[in-house]
Image (cartoon, rainbow, N blue to C red):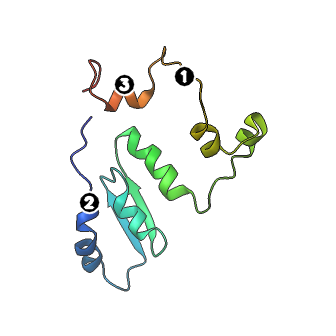
Amino acid sequence: MRYIGSKILLLDKISNFIPSEAHSVCDIFTGTASVSRHFKHSHKLISNDILYFSFVLQKAYLGLYEEPQFLEFKKKFNSHPIDYFNNKTEPYNLQHRPFIFENYSPNKNSQ
């Protein structure tokens, strides 16, 4: 993993740097998409990063403009996902290690 840090603390300076008449913002090295999220509702965005985790975050943060309805999940489990997982009492089967565990937690396989 090559995460260095978020630009959240720089958002005020970045905002002051963008001309008021600008309609678009290009967020290269998007990472956690904090800059793009900041400008999501006020500017047209171009965001880019080589890392796949950033693509996933961008799809979630920038591609959604309303809360997902989870219709298929509700149909299958008869519950909203938040309620389902908050009320889950049986243990999780971690026989196959989850992606986040393998890549972002301190274990022998993470970078």
Amino acid on which the number 3 mark rests in the picture: Glu
Viewer-nearest of discs 1 and 2: 1
Q: Looking at the image, which residue is at 32% across and 32% down?
A: 104
* Residues packed near mark 1 inside 10 Å, few (<14), some (14 to 19) or many (20 plus): few
Residue occupying the far bottom of the picture: 21
In the picture, the disc for residue 24 is none
Residue with the mark numbered 3: 102
Can you say whether 36 is above or below 77 in the image?
Answer: below
Position of residue 16 in the picture relative to residue 33 (left or right): left
Position of residue 86 in the picture relative to residue 57 (left or right): right
Amino acid on which the number 2 mark rests in the picture: Lys
Tell me which numbered mark, 1 or 2, is placed earlier along the sequence. Answer: 2
Mark 2 and mark 3: span between their CA atoms? 25 Å
In the picture, the disc for residue 91 is 1
The answer to whether mark 1 and mark 2 are in CB contact below 8 A is: no
Kind of element beneath mark 3: helix
Tell me which numbered mark, 2 or 3, is placed earlier along the sequence. Answer: 2
Q: Work out whether residue 3 or residue 100 is closer to the camera in this orientation and state it.
A: 100
In the picture, the disc for residue 7 is 2
Mark 3 and mark 1: span between their CA atoms? 19 Å
Tell me which numbered mark, 3 or 1, is placed earlier along the sequence. Answer: 1
Q: Looking at the image, which residue is at 53% across and 18% down?
A: 93
Amino acid on which the number 1 mark rests in the picture: Pro
Mark 1 and mark 2: span between their CA atoms? 37 Å
* Residues packed near mark 2 inside 10 Å, few (<14), some (14 to 19) or many (20 plus): some
Kind of element beneath mark 2: loop
Q: Looking at the image, which residue is at 48% across and 55% down?
A: 61
Q: Work out whether residue 29 or residue 9 is closer to the camera in this orientation and state it.
A: 9
Position of residue 81 in the picture relative to residue 79 (left or right): left
Image x and y of residue 88, in percent = 60, 32
